[in-house]
Image (spheres, grey):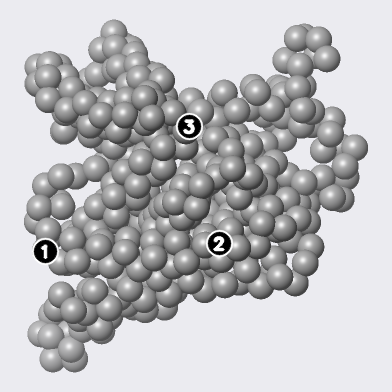
Amino acid sequence: MSPFDLSLRFFLQLVFILAVCQATAWLFAKVGQSRAVSEMVAGVLMGPSLLGWLAPSASAYLFPKASMPILFSIAQVALVLYMFTVGMDFDLALMRSRAKSAALVSAAGIAVPFALGVAIALHILARPEDGLFTAGVAPLQAALFLGAAMSITAFPILARIIHEQGISKTALGTLALAAGSMDDAAAWCLLAVVLSAFGHDPGMAIVAVAGGPLVALVLLGPVRRLLAPLGARVEREGTLGAGVFTRVLMLVMLAAFVTDAIRIYAVFGAFIAGVAMPRGRFVEEAKKRIEPLTSGFLLPLFFVYSGLNTRIGLLASPALVGLTLVIVLAACLGKGAACWAAARWSGESPRDALAAGILMNARGLMELIILNIGLERGIIQPTLFTIMVLMALATTLMATPLFRLVWRPVPAPADSAGARA
């Protein structure tokens, strides 16, 4: 395929991807699901699980193998920009405000699903004929990866549900956001350790383990101080100039390059760069410029790239279907039930504790990022990728309706209503 034909086909891909994502977003909005959930489903529908099964020739024409490197590259840009915005939403002050309860909920939400993930990984490794992990992956690496993948929380979706329900300033909203942010930070650190060790190169592992904290120290120390005057300038002028915005993007891409170069992953650098940005008007203006393009145009390409690697037809045996159900159940019990119990232990009301467990159980886009990293780095095979994607879909789809079922407004007492009247 010539470069011209590839370019021509790529623009057709974009039209098709955006149209399908718009249609699924419209349908899912009717049942109260967020756009991110609909795009996760749309990505799977556009892959071999549906389109490739119903119309293989159309699928091959729309998504030829030669176009995969292009989709992959743009998906990486989408993830970098997305994680940058997640970093800008990361509120250290919020973590401090509910530190004790949030730390307990987060610890339970990491430890229990991590332990279950390790147990499942060891079970999978005992059945090498299933081919779920790549040959040569050490048991410790497999256990750490699956443990981290089971432990992640969809922090952005959690934040969106909290915002949509108008509980951002409540005790529950603060607890869930603080616990979710701690939870994801711990899971990403675990993943960084896995990736640094997977190359079987002790020197590279040392570079990764030492380089990650060094990048964080530089970005959150000197770079953050250098950015402070720019933040003050934006506060005075009320806008983020094109020149400053370009320099911000250069910093984000440089941070992504450095963390990718030391074999951690580009999204780590982008996330830390987001945390380093000056709060206030600076972050608001940066998000106004980045979020519409990222969420409306770039991220759907990542969902499609994930969907093209998701082949439900691979779950052809009862054993694999059973394993999928076990993983979904373990994910819900390990995350939702553990966070509920920890919230109750820390003194939260039964309703708040149950709602916190439901919110923390959603995996969403963050899970897909981890899974794509594992697939790209050769840790897991497409069958396990598919199983884990289905788990991410199930836990994310159930989050909003279950939360709305549990978190119903408490009616005002009759006497207070009469007093207002």
Task: Measuring from the top left, give residue 403's x and y in whole percent.
Answer: 39, 71
Element at label 1: helix
User: What amino acid does circle 2 point to?
Assistant: Met
Left or right: where 21 falls relative to 122:
right
Determine the residue positioned at 59% across, 46% down.
380
Name the image quarter holding the N terminus: top right
Of circles 2 and 3, which is in front? 3
Task: Measuring from the top left, give residue 95's x and y in whole percent.
Answer: 15, 52
Figure quadrant of residue 251: top left
Residue matched to label 2: 391
Q: Relative to residue 250, is residue 269 depicted above or below?
A: below
Q: Are marks 2 and 1 in contact (CB under 8 Å)?
A: no
Residue 370 in sight: yes
Task: Measuring from the top left, give residue 65's x and y in whole percent.
Answer: 77, 28
Figure quadrant of residue 107: bottom left
- The disc label shown at residue 100, or none: 1
Element at label 3: loop
The answer to which of marks 2 and 1 sits earlier in the sequence is: 1
The answer to which of marks 2 and 3 sits earlier in the sequence is: 3
Q: Are marks 2 and 3 in contact (CB under 8 Å)?
A: no
Determine the residue positioned at 59% across, 43% down.
136
Task: Measuring from the top left, give residue 142's x and y in whole percent.
Answer: 50, 51
C-alpha gap between disc 2 and disc 3: 27 Å
User: What amino acid does circle 3 point to?
Assistant: Gly
The answer to which of marks 3 and 1 sits earlier in the sequence is: 1
Q: Relative to residue 129, is residue 412 depicted above or below?
A: below
